[in-house]
Amino acid sequence: MKILLIQIVLIAVVVAVVARLFRSRGARAQAIRRLGLILFAGFAVVSILIPDVWNRIAHLVGVGRGTDMVLYALVVAFLSFTVTTYLRFRDLETRYTKLARRLALDEVRGDRALPDDGDEPPADDPPSPR
């Protein structure tokens, strides 16, 4: 099996994207995503204006046609989007779980703080010294 340059480059990019997305959080990760989107939009404009550029890039890295090169680029972009979306949803689920736990604990503490008839302290709490 002959390994082409494009295969090595694509595997390296996929591994780098996944590793970077699993480690990154916050404003820096958002900035990287925005730069990626701008880069993607720039490539789209160049592709529309100069369609032969993909054929030249493809031949440089060992791919037969420019359309195959575009497909590989879209696969990497889709992988980045998928991993980013997964991480975002996982973070949201964690936040919702923590919020639900906090609300449940606050409700239990609130029930204990208010006596039922106003005269007696709750049964769980020891009487306060007077």
Image (cartoon, rainbow, N blue to C red):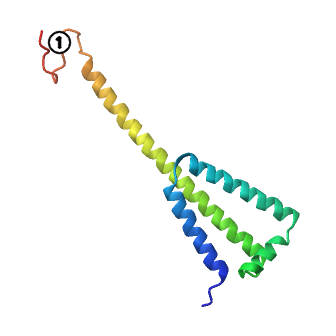
The amino acid on which the numbered mark 1 sits, given as a three-letter code, is Glu
Q: Residue 120: which quarter of the image?
A: top left
Badge 1 is on which residue?
Answer: 120
Residue lying furthest bottom in this view? 1
Q: Residues within 10 Å of mark 1 (few under 14, many from 20)?
A: few
**x and y percentages locating residue 130 in the rendered image:** 12, 9
- Tell me: residue 69, above or below residue 39: below
Towards the viewer: 21 or 85: 21
Q: Residue at x 60, y 60 (%)?
A: 80
Q: Give the x, y percent position of residue 104.
A: 34, 32
Q: How many marks?
A: 1
Viewer-closest of 118 and 17: 17
Residue 72 rendering spot, x and y as whole percentages: 68, 71
For residue 56, what is the image quadrant? bottom right
Query: Picture quarter containing residue 5?
Result: bottom right
Residue appearing at x 63%, y 79% in the figure: 7
Q: Nearer the viewer, residue 81 or 31?
A: 31
Looking at the image, residue 114 sits to the left or right of residue 82; the answer is left
Image-based side of 17 in relation to 63, left or right? left
Q: Residue furthest right?
A: 49
Residue lying farthest to the front in this orientation: 28
Kindly identify the residue that appears in the image at 69 percent across and 65 percent down.
74
